[in-house]
Image: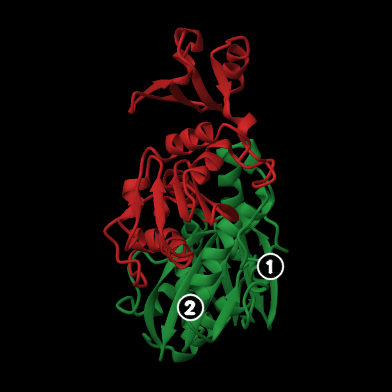
Chain colours: A red, B green
Amino acid sequence: MILCDIGNTSVDLFIDAKRSKSRADNFDPATLGGDDVYYVCVNAAINERIRDLANWHDLRELIDWDKYYPTMGIDRIMVCEAVEEGVIVDAGSAITVDVMRGGVYQGGFISLGLRPAQEAYARLSNALDVSFNFEVDLAKMAKNTPDAVAVGFLAPLVEKIERLGKPMYVTGGDGVLLSRFFSEAVVDEDLIFKGMKKLIEKGVKC
Amino acid sequence: MILCDIGNTSVDLFIDAKRSKSRADNFDPATLGGDDVYYVCVNAAINERIRDLANWHDLRELIDWDKYYPTMGIDRIMVCEAVEEGVIVDAGSAITVDVMRGGVYQGGFISLGLRPAQEAYARLSNALDVSFNFEVDLAKMAKNTPDAVAVGFLAPLVEKIERLGKPMYVTGGDGVLLSRFFSEAVVDEDLIFKGMKKLIEKGVKC
């Protein structure tokens, strides 16, 4: 069984508990023949090419959409499916924050990712074109520009997430970087694949 | 006495307790002859033309820079000068948040302004190219995309500001819009001019 997460720029595979990543524009789904492939896909061009492949199974079809909402990102739903109880932070180009209690989706919110946020500050003025200082003390008001920008973006977000309760799971490309600000957080880079696997194991609408 | 706040795109004048705004690229400082003009300016081109005008006085020279920090925006310092005690939120292209206690600057932070934040979400994906829902209940986790984006940007920021204490002063172009989320806030669109006036009245380094 192969798990596959297809984004607009990259394709993430999970085969025999090992991950591998390739560029979406080089990816040919027909090369994964034989074994069953369970996938989520937001890439329209690749989706078109998967359609005729009998061993590819779209996990959208197993989702109980009443639990979530129609425009919710499929990756977000998958990381929620991995967690029965807790707060899930997926830090990529957006930072999505979702809450699950007793297996029931409680809602969430979407913040800008670290890089898009820095780029948005840079667009405002040259003075704000600074890298976030990840060594900053978020509990203090800042007295220089790099700290003022880092505290301005990170402190409200980190404190809001902390107040959502425990346990907390952090995943995504910037998960490790962001997790340093949380007092207790489980960093799990494979959360999306765990969600996909749980969904397949249930085998029916969950 | 004329007060003048010169930005990169607009010039804000305060004459006889009345404000008027003009575009920076049309603005000729020599037209304000005779009366004393006290100004702050971040526009290099206009600054060059002011230099030879004897009735124009740069308020940078009255600031005690030890109280603030060298790269701090001059507008931010002016709104702080207006307030002895409290939290000052200036909601423009950036949202600056500063704390004054007993006339002493405690530090602050810088968030993205409402429009630049919305634009940054829009750049992430078409799905996130939505206007913030300002009717949203920030206390609730969201279950649709416009709310998820509005809660994601506004709830962490608003809650962080609320925790900084009272009294709270809100100013800037989006001040009225943002103030609806605060339980108690004084909206004062003339805060920058009040700060400029206080600085002039002290007449010496403050």
**Amino acid under disc 1:** Leu
Vertical arrangement, residue A163 with respect to residue A119, above or below: below
Mark 1 or mark 2, earlier in chain: 2
The dot on residue B177 is: 1
The answer to whether B176 appears left or right of B43 in the picture is right
**Element on which disc 1 rests:** helix
Q: Position of residue B139 (x, y in %)?
A: 61, 68
Q: Answer with the quarter of the image where residue B73 lies.
A: bottom left
Q: Position of residue A62 (x, y in %)?
A: 61, 32
Q: Disc 2 designates what residue?
A: B163
Kindly give the residue lying farthest to the left in the view shown.
A135
Q: Residue at x 30, y 66 (%)?
A: A137
Name the mark nearer the viewer: 1 or 2: 2
The answer to whether B2 appears left or right of A70 in the picture is left
**Amino acid under disc 2:** Arg
Q: Residue at x 54, y 13 (%)?
A: A55
Vertical arrangement, residue B15 with respect to residue A138, above or below: below
Q: Answer with the quarter of the image where residue A135 lies.
A: bottom left
Vertical arrangement, residue B109 with respect to residue B46, above or below: below
**Element on which disc 2 rests:** loop
Q: Position of residue B89 (x, y in %)?
A: 54, 73
The answer to whether A134 appears left or right of A169 in the picture is left
- The chain carrying label 1 is B
